[in-house]
Image (spheres, rainbow, N blue to C red):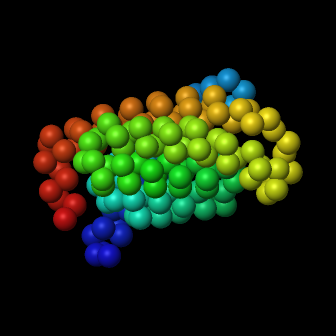
């Protein structure tokens, strides 16, 4: 991994952490933090699935350590980033990266969150308790990520990444 890529990945982590501290909105019983999902889509497209998962993991670590996130940041962010990266890598379609983020976080991670919350957080929740807020957050963030990364690609700014 090149130094330039590591610095850009660290910037993505910083943007995700800072953005989640300031940008959120009510989503039913929870709050939606769309910046993490936007970063996941952007990282998946610009760096690939491995670095996108690493960015999501490090963002989760910083958010949990600073008290701005919960342990649910790990499965949500990492699964969404992985699926977004895999779908973009396989098909090269920006919209599929967004679909991967939405399915990975909004559906798969929300289902994994049930036993995860029970074991690690001591919270009893029904199977679909997490799905509505996860879906609202991941859909809004994925749309934002698609808009941002498509603008970056049109401006040729992505050429500076490599």
Q: Nearer the viewer, residue 150 or 97?
A: 97
- Considering only vertical position in the picture, is 107 above or below 132? below
Q: Measured from the top left, where is residue 101 in percent x and y? A: 46, 43
Q: Measured from the top left, where is residue 16 in percent x and y? A: 48, 49
- Considering only vertical position in the picture, is 63 above or below 133? below
Side (left or right) of 17 relative to 128: left
Q: Where does the N terminus fall, quadrant-wise? A: bottom left
The reply to whether residue 9 is visible in this rendering is yes
Residue 145, quarter of picture:
top left
Residue 24, quarter of picture:
top right
Which residue sits at x=39%, y=59%? 49
Which residue sits at x=55%, y=43%? 105
Q: Measured from the top left, where is residue 78 in percent x and y? A: 53, 55
Side (left or right) of 152 relative to 43: left
Side (left or right) of 88 relative to 112: left
Q: Measured from the top left, where is residue 134 in percent x and y? A: 60, 36
The number of callouts visible is 0
């Amino acid at each position: 991994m090149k130094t330039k890529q590591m610095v850009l990945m660290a910037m993505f982590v910083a943007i995700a952490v800072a953005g989640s501290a300031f940008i959120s909105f009510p989503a039913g019983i929870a709050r939606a933090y769309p910046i993490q999902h936007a970063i996941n889509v952007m990282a998946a497209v610009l760096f690939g699935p491995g670095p996108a998962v690493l960015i999501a993991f490090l963002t989760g670590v910083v958010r949990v350590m600073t008290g701005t996130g919960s342990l649910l940041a790990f499965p949500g962010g990492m699964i969404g980033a992985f699926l977004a990266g895999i779908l973009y890598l396989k098909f090269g379609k920006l919209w599929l990266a967004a679909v991967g983020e939405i399915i990975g976080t909004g559906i798969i991670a929300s289902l994994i969150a049930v036993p995860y919350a029970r074991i690690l957080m001591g919270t009893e929740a029904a199977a679909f308790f997490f799905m509505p807020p996860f879906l609202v957050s991941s859909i809004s963030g994925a749309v934002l990520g698609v808009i941002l990364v498509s603008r970056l690609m049109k401006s040729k700014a992505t050429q500076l990444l490599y």
